[in-house]
Image (cartoon, rainbow, N blue to C red):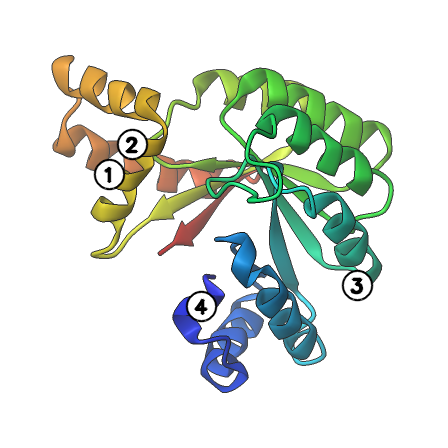
Amino acid sequence: MKAPAWRFSFDLLREVLERGRQRAIPVIFDSLGPEVAEATFSLITQLQPVYPALGCTLPGRWRRSVRDADRLSALGLRVRVVKGQWTDPDEPDCDTRTGFLAVIDRLVGGASHVAVATHDPDLARVALRRLRAAGTHCELELLFGLPARRVLQIADEEGVRVRLYVPYGASFLPYRLSHIRQTPHVGWWFLRDLLFGRACSQVRAARSARQKAAYANPRLRLGAEN
């Protein structure tokens, strides 16, 4: 969920939470920019008595995320850890991998549930092992359309569930193009797929196969992002 799109409105989100309750689906808020972090936390605090199955995203590249990890653990909320797209104005040159693991270390042994959201195999392995060693419930989270073979193998080795996010909606293409500008290697992945003939029809087929796999494999879950 992107709270600014809902104008941080409790009333607007009431129906979303009710749908989540009916389907036993957690509602996770995205981090977006650091300037909306406090407003997002305030909204979550209002919503939690109504629907406890809430969570929030913490970017490794924000200095405040280590402190926020304590805050979310104390509230018993789910935590999704990402490298982060928006820089911290107070620490623009922060190393995202170091920051990511600093947040993980703060959540170890304290968080109710941690989603390790990365396609970086080495980072995923270290994060999952630290969490599992402390008995912290965790899962790997991946975004449909990005390379996943190596990191899926790591999830299997570590014995953790995988949640696959499938972006949808009219805003997906502009979002992906902006993501490519920020991370050029993603553009190379897409171009490589086109050059080797894995175009739109293959993408649709892969999505269908992954959806079927989710039903066949209880350790693979599907999510959605818009």
Name the spot of residue 72 as percent of width and height, x first. 75, 57
Q: CA distance from mark 4 to mark 2?
A: 23 Å
Instruction: Specify which label sits upstream in the sequence, 3 or 2.
Output: 3
Residue 183 percent coordinates (x, y): 36, 27
Q: Position of residue 10 (x, y in %)?
A: 54, 82
Q: Secondary structure at mark 4?
A: helix
Rendered location of residue 213, percent (x, y)? 42, 36
Q: If you read the primary sequence from the N terminus, does the residue marked by circle 3 or circle 1 appear first?
A: 3
* Mark pair 1, 2: CA separation: 5 Å
Q: Nearer the viewer, mark 3 or mark 1?
A: 1
Q: Tell me: residue 4, above or below residue 31.
A: below
Q: Nearer the viewer, mark 3 or mark 2?
A: 2
User: Pointer 1: what residue?
Assistant: 177
List the residue tagged with mark 2: 180
Nearest the viewer among 209 and 197 is 197
Q: CA distance from mark 4 to mark 1?
A: 21 Å
Checking the image for residue 75, the label placed there is 3
Q: Which mark is residue 4?
A: 4
The front one of 64 and 101 is: 64
For the residues labelled 3 and 1, the Cα–Cα distance comes to 36 Å
Cβ–Cβ under 8 Å for marks 1 and 2: yes
